[in-house]
């Protein structure tokens, strides 16, 4: 997946976690918790789902670093994430 596909993929999951949020208004470097009003459990669930769907390992220690759309996309790019068929 290229960067724009990864961004769309992550936004899809963010929208599931915060359906009332306007993903088009989300700034790529905004802290997702306050920006989308999602709590740590919603974030954790989203990251586990992404990890499973992309067939990659995301440790709980890394979650704290992945608090923005850009950081998540960069992490997925660096990990060579590919969606499971």
Image (spheres, rainbow, N blue to C red):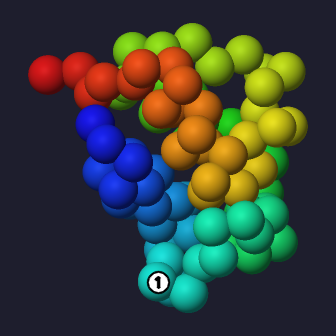
Q: Give the residue at mark 1.
A: 24
Q: Nearer the viewer, residue 41 or 73?
A: 73
| Secondary structure found at label 1 | helix
Image quadrant assignment for residue 83: top left
Residue 62 place in picture, x, y as percent: 78, 26
Q: Nearer the viewer, residue 15 or 25?
A: 25
Q: Nearer the viewer, residue 77 or 47?
A: 77
**Quadrant showing the C terminus:** top left
Asked if residue 43 shows in the view, the reply is no
Residue 7 place in picture, x, y as percent: 43, 55
Number of marks drawn: 1
Neighbor class of circle 1 (other Cα within 10 Å; few <14, some 14-19, many 20+) is few
Residue placed at 40% from the left, 24% from the top? 81
Residue placed at 68% from the left, 38% from the top? 44
Q: In this view, does 9 lie above or below 65?
A: below
> In the shown orientation, is residue 38 left or right of residue 13?
right
Residue placed at 52% from the left, 60% from the top? 14
Residue 55 place in picture, x, y as percent: 39, 15
Residue farthest to the left, as pictured: 85
Q: Nearer the viewer, residue 39 or 72?
A: 72
Q: In this view, does 79 lie above or below 5?
A: above
**Quadrant showing the N terminus:** top left
Q: Is residue 29 above or below residue 6?
A: below
Image quadrant assignment for residue 11: bottom left
> In the shown orientation, is residue 32 left or right of residue 75?
right
Asked if residue 4 shows in the view, the reply is yes
């Amino acid at each position: 997946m290229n960067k724009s596909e990864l961004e769309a993929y992550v936004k899809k999951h963010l929208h599931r976690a915060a359906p009332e949020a306007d993903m088009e208004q989300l700034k790529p470097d905004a802290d997702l918790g306050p920006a989308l009003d999602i709590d740590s459990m919603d974030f954790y669930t989203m990251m586990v789902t992404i990890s499973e769907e992309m067939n990659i390992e995301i440790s709980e220690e890394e979650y704290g670093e992945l608090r923005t759309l850009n950081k998540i996309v960069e992490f997925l790019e660096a990990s060579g994430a590919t969606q499971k068929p």
